[in-house]
Image (cartoon, rainbow, N blue to C red):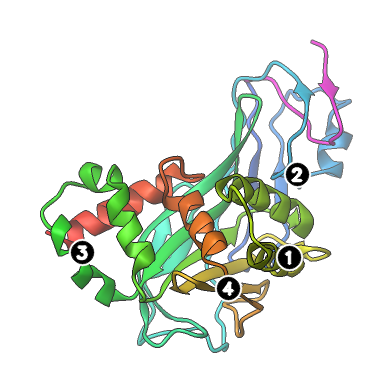
Amino acid sequence: MLWSVATSTLIWLPSSYTISISTSTSWNSNPRPCFPRGIPQDLLPLLHKSPTFPLLSTFSHHFSPQDLSFHTHFSPKASSSSSSVVGSPDYREEPSTNVKFQTLLRLPGCSSPLSLLGTGYREKVFAIIGVKVYAAGLYVNQSILSTLDAWKGQSAQEIQDDSYLFGAIFQSPLEKSLQIVLVRAVDGKTFWDALDDAISPRIKSPTPVDESALSTFRSIFLGRPLKKGTIMFLTWLDPTKMLVSVSSDGLPSAVDATIESMNVTMALFDVFFGSDPVSPSLKTSVSNGLATMLK
């Protein structure tokens, strides 16, 4: 079999091999690759050399595998920051990444605790191989639910297909926040480039205000390595203002930037909850949560 890798040290294996990457319960643990018997000896040095992959950019690969799977397990690290749980912490686990999300949080800049509606994961596809990049969870001010009476009694599928409902959530002047937890390390610029590729097409004619907001957003990530376990919060205070918080050591203790452009904040919300979401599993889970709460 011909093995070829272009512009990356990522090594693709035949369908009979599976790599399992296990971690301990600390956010700061280093992954330990475990390789099955039978891998060609000339590939082992390369596999040991590069267990962490650049996951958000686009590469050109030539290979013929059929299956490659990764398993990661995270438990949240205790934090003494101003982001905190209310009372004893309860968690909900995102099943595909095993990342645990607190069900109730108080975040910097928010007037009330926010409740978890649903979780999901972002998967980046290289040719035919899907690699999980991060887990995500949507939190909302529970008072938002009282504005959604028109959707009471609807099924999860009806809610998921209704763009007006998600538009009503975005337009509400009450807080909602997207928590992102990286399940592998990535360069900050690479992460931003992937995010910008999703946001920019949704802003047809950016204004100077939009450009300034995007520049502020970009500056948070450039030159910043994002290790596995890094937590980000994108918190919409209202349709025109969004807070960005990033921490590699537990929950964020402060706001890193304020984005003030409705075009940018709306485009970002659409990236996750529009008709073509980057994480279908997140939108499905949120829809299920809304259907349960609006019965």
Q: What residue type is disc 4 on?
A: Glu
Image position of 11 with respect to 286: above or below: above
Q: Give the residue number, with chain letter if any, for mark 1.
A: 215
What's the magenta region?
Answer: 1-15
- Element type at marker 3? loop
Q: Earlier in the sequence, mark 1 or mark 4?
A: 1
What amino acid does circle 2 point to? Phe
In front here: 124 or 250? 124
At label 1, the amino acid type is Ser
Name which residue lies at 26% across and 51% down: 288
> Nearer the observer, disc 1 or disc 3?
1
- Residue at the spot 28% in from the left edge and 55% down from the top edge: 165
Residue picked out by circle 2: 53
Tag nearer the camera, 3 or 4: 4
Q: Which mark is residue 260?
A: 4
Badge 4 crowding class, 10 Å Cα cut-off, few under 14, some 14 to 19, many 20 or more, is many
Query: Which mark is on residue 148?
Result: 3
Nearer to us of marks 4 and 2 is: 4
